[in-house]
Image (tube, helix red, strand yellow):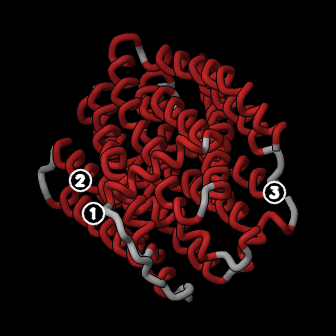
Amino acid sequence: MNINTFRAFQSRNYSLFFAGQSVSLMGTWMQRTAVYWVIYVQTNSAFILGLSVFASQFPSFLFSLLGGTIADRYDRFKVLLFTQIASMIQAIAMTLVVMFTDYSVVELICLSVLLGIVNAFDVPARQSLVHYMVSKKEDVGNAIALNSTMVNLARLIGPALAGFILETFGAGICFMLNSLSFIAVIISLLAMKLPAYIPQAHTQKMLADLKDGLRYLKSTPSLGILILLLSLMSLLVLPYTTLFPIIAKEALGGDATIYGYLNSFVGLGALSGAILLASTSNNLRKLLIIATALFGLGVTLFSLSHTLIFSFLFCTLAGFGMMMHVTIINTLLQTTASSEMRGRVISYFAMAFFGMQPLGALLIGTISHYVGAAETLFFEGCIALIIIALFAPYLWRVTNIK
């Protein structure tokens, strides 16, 4: 690590964004951890657990392309401010339902669907706005990597806090703290001084814009192959954390605290990978091959572990590889795509990342219901190794061309 690791912080707008989002994301991870634990404890069903993940993320699959088009057509700052306020309202509703009603799993799933719709518009606007937060365009890649550091620092702290709060105070407090955390990001957004938004004339309808984005990916294979790789990993491997409540309770004989720790050690590995990635910008495609292989290896070894220390170790390895896999693809897409297509390219990234995972969670939950959680995890780890073995020759070839 060196001073260049944090060079994007020289931009005041990005520093504000990083600070506000760091607080908000801790709350987000607390809520996510609490929702999945409560649903599993109430139902004791791997299928319902997978269904809840599906319900919370599938709306991103349905609306992310529309979200990307809106990010390209309208003021990204205003779109982001709106989605953050909407997310805070959802968190407040979750708090009120859990603390003051005789709620069921249905209410939690419905509110999760609402948040998934909001996220479909939030992600493309937030990701593409980073370009306007940094003063030096050569620091964009560093800012994207630092974003991953921020996300995974929150993933390290949030679930651990959620596990403690769940056991001590109950789920309602987790949701309340998440709703309060949005105050930080809203204040940080309002304190920014971004370049004035200049409306662009649009001579075609949104549907035509969506088709243009797809044609752009088809005509740029170096980007299209990355979306395809992420789609396969999101469908078949990335939903592995869906099974963490089952592993924590049944395989490791733990409670909500152990479940929180499993997520936190994934966050620890992801944070380590993010810091490493922020320190380098070379050979990203080669690094993508290595990271994906480590991800698959970590999930495979975790599936075979029956002790806490090794489970935490292999969760860390899986988190390290997973974060680098996703962030490298995000960085390559944002730094390679043309500016007028960036929002739509990011929307395809969001569709692959946030959209395919719920389908995968439903698939993984169903398979686990019949064959067991550990066996399903082993299958996912092996699939990751097979996928990267198939993609590695192309990724290596593109690296050598460049």
Label 2 amino acid? Leu
In this rendering, the answer to whether 268 lies above or below 240 is below
Local crowd size for mark 1, using a 10 Å CA cut-off: few (<14), some (14–19), many (≥20): some
Label 3 amino acid? Ser
- Marks 1 and 2 sit apart, C-alpha to C-alpha, by 7 Å
**Helix, strand or loop at disc 2?**
helix
Q: Position of residue 349 (x, y in %)?
A: 50, 48
- Residue 74 numbered mark, or none: none
Which residue position holds label 1? 90
Image quadrant in which you'd find residue 301: top right
- Marks 3 and 2 sit apart, C-alpha to C-alpha, by 39 Å
Q: Nearer the viewer, residue 379 or 247?
A: 379
- Marks 1 and 3 sit apart, C-alpha to C-alpha, by 36 Å
Which residue position holds label 3? 279
Q: Nearer the viewer, residue 174 or 318?
A: 318
Q: Earlier in the sequence, mark 1 or mark 2?
A: 1
Q: Residue at x 53, y 21 (%)?
A: 380
Local crowd size for mark 2, using a 10 Å CA cut-off: few (<14), some (14–19), many (≥20): some
Q: Residue at x 49, y 66 (%)?
A: 126
| Mark 3 or mark 2, whichever is nearer to me | 3
Q: Residue at x 42, y 28 (%)?
A: 249
**Helix, strand or loop at disc 3?**
loop
For the view shown, which residue lies furthest in the right direction? 2
Label 1 amino acid? Gln
For the view shown, which residue lies furthest in the top direction? 371
* Contact? badges 1 and 2 (CB < 8 Å): yes
| Mark 1 or mark 3, whichever is nearer to me | 3
Which residue position holds label 2? 111
Q: Earlier in the sequence, mark 3 or mark 2?
A: 2
